[in-house]
Amino acid sequence: MATGHIDPVPSHTGHNPFLRSVAAISTLAGWTAAAMIVAAVAITVQMIVIRYVFNGSTVWQTEAVIYLVIAATLIGLPYVQRLRGHVNVDLIPLALTGRTRYAMAMVTSILSIVIVAIMVFYGFDYWHFAYSRGWTSDTIWAVRLWIPYAAIPIGFGLLLLQLIADLVAVIIGVDKPFGLEDN
């Protein structure tokens, strides 16, 4: 029986397995980032209770919160990109139509991919350098720095994957340039 209801096609993915897989990975990254923020808040509360209720000292809490918030920011990048949740100035794309908007989308997407790929390369290099040299933080906790530094290549690597998926979605026509419908 026809009800007039049409199942919506998921945004940015259509039924393309690559796009759907990247969307799932980006969503998982978003949930992971959210869990890191919740953990950072819980650790902060625990630190406050230890310091001000029990008049005790804290050793690892401040450092853990800093690393968790930074990692959440980096690992959350692909999810924000997937949802187009970043600050967006679309005055120029709104003024353009058709082929010109498409061309601008291609140029900006490719430039974004190149810049983020550079960040992945140097982020991995920095992570590997910290790992191979056995760097630790200069605190009593002495965190092996390769662990928090791993968020750099992971976060930017996942962002790179999402940017590639966004470009593919526009090229194959699953998504519109800048997510804007033609006038």
Image (cartoon, grey):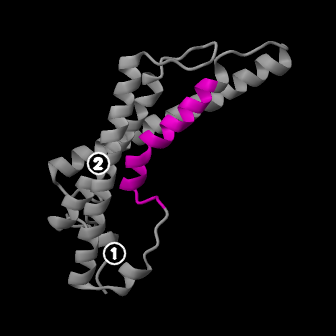
Query: At which x and y percent is residue 72?
Result: 49, 38
Query: At which x and y percent is residue 31?
Result: 44, 38
Q: Seen in the image, is 85 located left or right of residue 181?
A: right
* Residue range (magenta): 63-86
Q: Seen in the image, is 38 located left or right of residue 171?
A: right
Residue at screen point 33% across, 33% down: 125
Give residue 37's quadrant in the image. Answer: top right
> Is 133 a magenta residue?
no
The foreground one among 116 and 3 is 116
Residue 81 against residue 24 in the figure, above or below: below
Query: At which x and y percent is residue 24?
Result: 30, 43
The foreground one among 132 and 26 is 132
Q: Seen in the image, is 158 located left or right of residue 137?
A: left
Amino acid type, mark 2: Ala
Q: Mark 2 points at which residue?
A: 117
Q: Mark 1 points at which residue?
A: 180
